[in-house]
Image: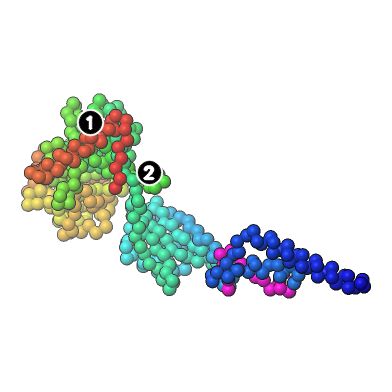
């Protein structure tokens, strides 16, 4: 056999051996199949061992790509980052400042406005915006939408649609509700001692407001008095505390006398606080229509700090930082709103045929406060200032009976609702559940209830 023939046969045998070897290796691996159950392109790999042209023609595919499907570049992952609202910011301005075109910012804000007023964003609030990078990085990242946490439970999401418009949807976060207890003896003051006992400041403000008619927090609370508060906490699915809710029970022990109140939702939809007899803790008017203020001047004769002579002071003065919110003392209709001589910026609210309240020296009125507007007790009507005849920022507060100023400390206003019959029985059931929760927490057992 010639040398040339022996070389040719050797090449044929070698090629056959390689092909056989490749097939033997593949018999131990289940063949991959395409969308129609046929072997995928990996089964054709042995061809490439002896055919460089065929190898060059093969395309690399993602393992999940069906046979016959063109290779498509994967979308890069989206990302988001928060925008923090500062005083004076608008949502549209924030978005444009983040690199979003004015047209897209307008579209997103318009979509959001169908579920939430963008003007209600407040300083310190975070708006999360989302983008997706372009595959080749040659263009600006694509704006996908934004999310706004309206409150601790509700979130509004604005997302780009297939036709490049924006649509807003509302989401409700799944939260776990627990109850916590804070109790102690007053050594310095109620605020500091309750805070040290774990009661959040917002909860304490609500407690003070609930007692604000019956209790003079400037003089009635003394060292040695006690407090007990049962309040809500809300946790997300990771266990993170996201909100300290309202309080369901409070008891102030003042000079040895107990003053417990319980939160109860009546069958007709009213949620309020009631004493053990089922009498509402809410009175017709608040004695203190402001939080965290110091009573700086009482009703009666005094030497006027500006005029320099003794003059009747026909109201209460509450010293507070400029800009502190002022609340409506009760439900009613605004009779006067504007500048009123020595009172400076002023509001008077008519509550019924007998009683009105007046508020002076305000820095400014709250948005929408005007003559004829209906307001609810506790609604913000203005902010502490020093307009008019005033030596410093404070609220001048008056209660008028038949148009005549009277001493707020001596007015005996009727209490609110008194529960009777079946509603009183429902309240007693609520009270029993609250007291069971208190007993469990006082004994060191966490009491939790899901909403």
Taking the spot 60% from the left edge, 69% from the top edge, the residue there is 39
The residue drawn where x is 34% and y is 60% is 170
Q: Position of residue 76 (x, y in %)?
A: 54, 63
**Of helix, strand and loop, which one carries label 2?**
strand
Q: Is residue 128 above or below residue 181?
A: below
> Which quadrant would residue 182 be assigned to in this image?
top left
* Left/right of residue 272 with respect to residue 78 in the rendered view: left
Q: State the count of labels.
A: 2
Label 2 crowd bin: few (<14), some (14–19), many (20+), radius 10 Å: some
Expressed as whole percent of the image width and height from the top left, the position of residue 403 reads: 9, 49
Whichever of callouts 1 and 2 sits on the residue coming sooner in the sequence is 1
Residue at the image position 92 percent from the left and 73 percent from the top = 2
Q: Which mark is residue 241?
A: 2
Is residue 14 part of the magenta span, yes or no? no
> What separation in Å lies between label 1 and label 2 (alpha carbons)?
31 Å
Q: How is the image coloured?
A: rainbow
Task: Find out whether residue 62 is within the magenta segment.
Answer: yes
| Residue 264, disc | none
Provide residue 391's location: percent of width, then percent of height.
Answer: 27, 43
- Horizontally, residue 450 falls left or right of residue 376, namely right
Q: Above or below — where is 145 with respect to 285?
A: below
Give the labeled residue for mark 1: 221
The span picked out in magenta is 52-68
**Which image quarter is the N terminus in?**
bottom right
């Amino acid at each position: 056999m010639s040398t040339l023939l022996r070389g040719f046969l050797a090449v044929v045998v070698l090629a056959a051996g390689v092909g056989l070897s490749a097939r033997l290796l593949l018999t131990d691996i289940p063949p991959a199949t395409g969308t129609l159950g046929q072997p995928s392109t990996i089964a054709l790999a042995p061809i490439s061992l002896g055919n460089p042209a065929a190898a060059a023609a093969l395309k690399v595919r993602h393992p999940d790509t069906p046979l016959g499907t063109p290779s498509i570049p994967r979308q890069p992952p989206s990302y988001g980052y928060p925008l923090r609202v500062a005083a004076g910011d608008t949502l549209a301005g924030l978005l444009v400042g983040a690199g979003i075109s004015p047209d897209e910012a307008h579209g997103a804000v318009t979509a959001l406005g169908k579920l939430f007023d963008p003007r209600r964003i407040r300083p310190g609030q975070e708006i999360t915006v989302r983008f997706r990078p372009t595959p080749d990085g040659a263009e600006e990242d694509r704006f996908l939408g934004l999310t706004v946490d309206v409150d601790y439970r509700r979130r509004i999401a604005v997302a780009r649609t297939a036709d490049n418009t924006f649509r807003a949807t509302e989401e409700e976060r799944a939260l776990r509700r627990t109850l916590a207890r804070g109790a102690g003896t007053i050594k310095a003051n109620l605020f500091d001692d309750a805070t040290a006992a774990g009661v959040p400041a917002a909860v304490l403000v609500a407690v003070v407001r609930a007692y604000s008619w019956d209790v003079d927090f400037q003089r009635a609370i003394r060292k040695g008095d006690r407090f007990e508060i049962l309040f809500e906490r809300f946790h997300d699915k990771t266990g993170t505390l996201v909100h300290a809710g309202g309080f369901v029970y409070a008891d102030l022990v003042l000079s040895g006398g107990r003053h417990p109140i319980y939160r109860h939702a009546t069958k007709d939809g009213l949620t309020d606080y009631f004493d053990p007899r089922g009498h509402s803790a809410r009175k017709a008017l608040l004695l203190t229509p402001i939080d965290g203020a110091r009573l700086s001047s009482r009703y009666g004769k005094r030497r006027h700090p500006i005029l320099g002579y003794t003059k009747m002071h026909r109201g209460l003065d509450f010293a507070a930082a400029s800009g502190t919110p002022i609340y409506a003392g009760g439900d009613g209709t605004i009779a006067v709103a504007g500048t009123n001589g020595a009172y400076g910026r002023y509001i008077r609210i008519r509550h019924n045929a007998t009683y009105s309240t007046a508020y002076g020296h305000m820095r400014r009125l709250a948005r929408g406060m005007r003559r004829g507007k209906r307001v609810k007790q506790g609604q913000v009507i203005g902010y502490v200032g020093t307009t008019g005849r005033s030596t410093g920022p404070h609220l001048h507060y008056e209660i008028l009976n038949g148009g005549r100023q009277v001493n707020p400390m001596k007015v005996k206003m009727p209490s609110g609702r008194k529960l009777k019959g079946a509603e009183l029985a429902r309240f007693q059931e609520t009270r029993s559940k609250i007291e069971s929760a208190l007993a469990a927490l006082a004994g060191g057992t966490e009491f939790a209830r899901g909403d």
